[in-house]
Image (cartoon, helix red, strand yellow):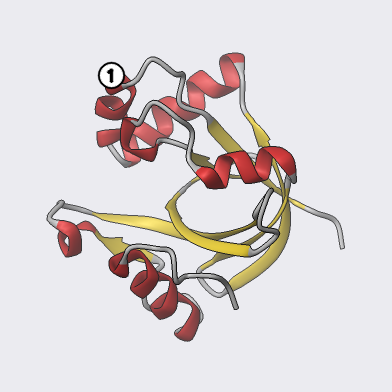
Amino acid sequence: MSDTARLPDWIADHVRRYQQSNGADGHMWDASSVGGSGVFPTLLLTTTGRKSKRRQVLPLIYGTTPTGYAIVASKGGAPAHPAWYLNLSADPDVEVQVGAEKFGARARTASGAERSALWKQMAAIYPPYEDYQRRTRREIPVVVLERRER
């Protein structure tokens, strides 16, 4: 399992339900559970802490790419990148669960035209990303997760 003790209760609960149901409960996340609106596809991303070396699992909204999945390191528009992004920057080999499917992946940060296209796609899936980008001076990273060969 993973270290969910440090997560807000609603995120730890989302991870628990997703894992216990093998993705049947939690893959499609209902944002009304935290006062938002809409239902969004989520995957579970497992990174290894760059300092702690603990495995950390987080549910993240995703989109598909020609080679895998895209996720956004928004942290709600905070000035600093989220810890999970710093972790995968240090160790890009991650574990992913999309619904019931589990696999190893390699993470990379999209850039240029690829980032622009994926940003538009992800903002269409989850419109608050545009507000998050306006709140911060940093360019919010878009990460591509590509399946590792076995």
Splitting the image into 4 quarters, where does residue 42 fall?
bottom left
> Which one is nearer the viewer's eye here, 43 or 139?
139
Give percent across and percent down for residue 13.
34, 74
The single residue placed furthest to the bottom in the displayed view is: 20
Identity of the residue drawn at 55% across and 47% down:
84
Mark 1 = which residue?
134
Is residue 24 visible to us here? Answer: no
Q: Left of 69 or right of it: where is 134?
A: left
Quadrant assignment for the N terminus: bottom right
Judging from the image, what secondary structure is the residue with disc 1 in?
A: helix
Give percent across and percent down for residue 139.
46, 19
Is residue 139 visible to us here? Answer: yes
Give percent across and percent down for residue 149.
85, 56
Give percent across and percent down for residue 127.
26, 35
> Which one is nearer the viewer's eye here, 31 or 116?
31
Q: Is residue 59 above or below residue 2?
A: above
**Amino acid at circle 1:** Arg
